[in-house]
Image (spheres, rainbow, N blue to C red):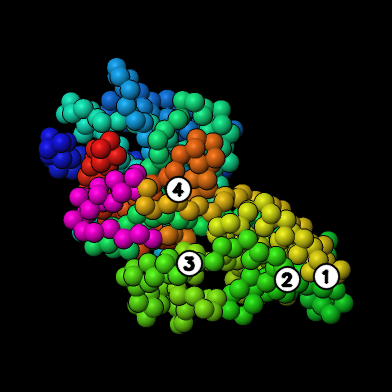
Amino acid sequence: MQPVLDYLQQHQPRFLRELCEYLRFPSVSAQPQHRADLGSCARWLLGHCRQIGLDAELHPTAGNPILVARTPPRAGRRPCYLVYGHYDVQPPEPFELWKSPPFEPRIEGDSLFARGACDNKGQHLAHLKAVEAFLQTGTELPCDLIFLIEGEEEVGSENLAPFLRAHRDELRCGAVVISDNGIPSLEHPALTYGLRGITALEVRVDGPARDLHSGLFGGTLDNPAMALCQLLAKLRDKHGRVAIPGFYDDVVPLTAYERKQLARLPHRDAEYRKFLGVPALFGERGFSSNERRMARPTVEINGLTSGYQGDGSKTIVPAWASAKLTFRLVPDQHPEKIQRLIVRHLKKLAPPTVSVTVTPGHSGPPYLVNPTSAAAQAALHALEGAFGRKPVLMREGGSIPIVAQFKQVLGADTLLLGLSLPDDNAHSPNEKFDLRCFAAGMKMSALLWKELAK
Ligand code: BES
Ligand code: ZN
């Protein structure tokens, strides 16, 4: 094992250069103009996997290609594990808030700034570097590995689920390993045993056939922007509890044990509030901030558009208004069932003065796994070995829609071993990845395969 760890140490500067190369592709899956960049990024990854000694292929889909890379075939049977990641990234906008361009990686101290640095290129590259170390030092890997790296996670992984079903036999594995999430701090490595689910939709309100003079016509017809705001305002109460009938019916209450565990995570509301830059925290009564963001459902408006957005003022009644919404879900809420409740409720609330159209978007179920399994114990050991600290157990508020499919289609549990820090600015301007997390991640990955084989 020592040659592997030495290799990882010795080649850090090159690993960093490679990560920078990878980060230069503007692989923004939400934006059609980047379609070709996703292809180039996938081909770079393919080349890289082959270069480090993996058997790799790209599989075209209706969307972006899926990369599958495997450790070379060997005689004899060993356990097989699957590492999942995504090479697509969130849109970088607003550009003006970036201290340096999002696709021109910049290093400052221990931080590497670029869109995709932590979410998720840096995190899965750490796993690729660990396997490279085994392959290039001729160290026997105690297991076979499959890397499954897709290009549509940030838009809901809709082409990956059918791919899993079509390739379920080739993708069989004892467990899935994902580093696409966070830890509370470098002193608190974590095994994450739960994720929130998600369901997305758009609500559009149409009013007059065209924008109208608000002085000439205002007062005689409904204003679509106003109507939309009134509709959206009814989706939650003043504390943020979702006000849709039936929404909480399937929510499994937090156990006393879990609440105690979550309360042990390092967290102070006052500091957290400052970190967020808000005048006061907000959310459902009776739950701590960590409980609210990790284990309680929410509704969020992600985007709101209507009327005139340019300089100065323009006195109109806009012809239409629209909102992009997501609901975060927790066990045992079912995304399709929740979608139906939401659509039904919005239709019921819709005033007769405008027309309301609801377009359902992507969905992913919540996830919860047993943190005391043998695989989880192995992961805890690897985390401790790599970070030099006792790991904590936590849940996360973010979603990785495909995780539930790994269980359903492959029958595999997922170990979520995040490498990102709370101030990494995932989905925000100035996203970064901490190079200490990159190094610890490689080591953790190398140790993990040994621990899992024990
Ligand atoms: N890496 C995140 C998910 C994440 C972040 C999980 C932090 C746990 C902690 C992932 O790339 C992501 O952003 N997922 C989307 C999924 C959605 C677009 C379907 C999310 O959570 O918004
Ligand atoms: Zn993300």
How crowded pointer 2 is (Cα within 10 Å; few <14, some 14-19, many 20+) is rated as some
Q: Does the closest atom of ligand 2 sit within 8 Å of the Cβ of label 4?
A: yes
Residue at left 63%, top 53%?
A: 335
Residue 16: horizontal and vertical position, in percent?
A: 24, 44
Which dot, 2 or 4, sits closer to the camera?
Answer: 2
Residue type at the position of mark 1? Pro
How far, Cα to Cα, is label 2 from label 4?
32 Å
Label 4 sits on residue: 89
Asked if the residue at tag 3 contacts the one at tag 2, i.e. Cβ–Cβ closer than 8 Å, the answer is: no
- Considering depth in this image, is 9 or 407 the residue closer to the camera? 407
How crowded pointer 3 is (Cα within 10 Å; few <14, some 14-19, many 20+) is rated as few
For marks 1 and 2 on the same chain, the one whose residue lies earlier in the sequence: 2
- Residue 351 got which mark? 1
Left/right placement of residue 424 relative to residue 237 reads left
Residue 376: horizontal and vertical position, in percent?
A: 34, 48
Left/right placement of residue 114 relative to residue 451 reads right
Residue type at the position of mark 2? Leu
Q: Is residue 346 magenta?
A: no
Q: Quadrant of residue 70?
A: top left
Residue type at the position of mark 3? Thr
Q: In which quarter of the image is residue 345?
A: bottom right
How far, Cα to Cα, is label 1 from label 2?
9 Å
Q: Which secondary structure, mark 3?
A: loop
Label 2 sits on residue: 231
For marks 2 and 3 on the same chain, the one whose residue lies earlier in the sequence: 2
How far, Cα to Cα, is label 4 from label 1?
38 Å
How far, Cα to Cα, is label 3 from label 4?
35 Å
Label 3 sits on residue: 255
Q: Give the range drawn in magenta.
A: 374-394
For marks 4 and 1 on the same chain, the one whose residue lies earlier in the sequence: 4
Which dot, 3 or 1, sits closer to the camera?
Answer: 3
